[in-house]
Image: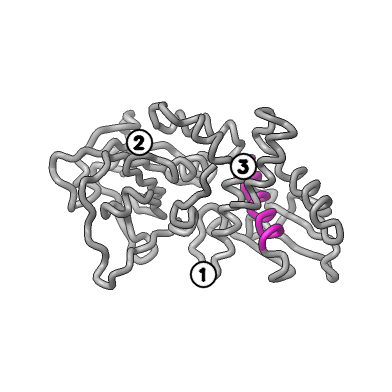
Amino acid sequence: MAEANHISALLKFALGEDRFPIDVGSVAIEVSRHRFPDSPIAQVQGVDIGGFDGVLKANRDRSKWLIAYSNKVQSEGRKRYTISHEFGHYVLHRHLQYSFSCSASDIESGDHGQRNIEAEADRFACNLLMPLDDFRCQTEGEVIDFDLLGHCADRYGVSLTAAALRWIEIAPERAVLVASRDDHMLWAKSNDNAFKAGNFFATRKDTIELPQSALAHSALGSHNTRAQLSPAATWFMHEPDHVKVVEHVVNARSYDYQLTLLLMPDADSQYPQHDDGEPEEDTFDRFINNGQYPVR
């Protein structure tokens, strides 16, 4: 985050509000030339790299680096995020290895290992493309729905998924973002307030079907409503009957799945953790490093 915030501050000083959306390819080349002149990024280009969304690769003596993104990806937001992710590997991890090959599951949504360099590259990309101070200015005091998050996605030139995940980090109420396809969850991300109240889905361990009454469920596929107020217990069985959840749904075209945003009032009490005494982690748990960001 510190590395991304430093670059973001330089861009703000030089370009002000006109810096969005960031031309991250040009930024990666220029920053690398000035900071690491003996080993800069020489090129950023789209290529046919079947099976991967992005690649960072050095030549034999590491005197030059290449960032490549899949030319099969149509979404400009996904391309920008992929380039930023690989730029994050360059800034943070280039001393670890000569080459990084990242699939769609590594970028924005990875299920990662112990060192978790993919999550670190994601965190870099997120903070570079969507600086937290500016993101707050776009959302504070506004009614949160996918139209507003779509505005943020357009402003920063990222996918709706990336913008929604960014907002989840700073949501004041309990918030859960669910991606689903064919009536089953692909992944789910809960913010700290929701997680501590037991509002999360262990998608890494279990195959979880959407509730029958969920707007994203095929049983309601012909329904025109894209938002509804429902009992929270429909999604989380431990919730009291009086607690309601606001449910928003949209198609994330770039990823061929549906996004469901669940918003609930803050919980007055917290719920027990798992029997092993450690909280369950879902697919995106490491994306925000426990939600701890520096005070600005």
Give the extent of the magenta segment: 76-92
Q: In the visual, does 174 lie left or right of 130?
A: left
For marks 3 and 2 on the same chain, the one whose residue lies earlier in the sequence: 3
Q: Does 80 appear in magenta?
A: yes
* Residue at image coords 79%, 49%: 29
* The C terminus - image quarter: top right
Q: Which mark is residue 32?
A: none
SS type, badge 2 = strand
Q: Amino acid at mark 1?
A: Gly
Question: How busy is the neighbourhood of tag 2: few (under 14 within 10 Å), some, or many (20 plus)?
Answer: many
Q: Nearer the viewer, residue 2 or 191?
A: 2
Mark 1 vs mark 2, CA separation in Å: 32 Å
* Residue at image coords 32%, 53%: 195
Q: Amino acid at mark 2?
A: His
Q: Which mark is residue 248?
A: 2
What residue would you read off at disc 3? 129
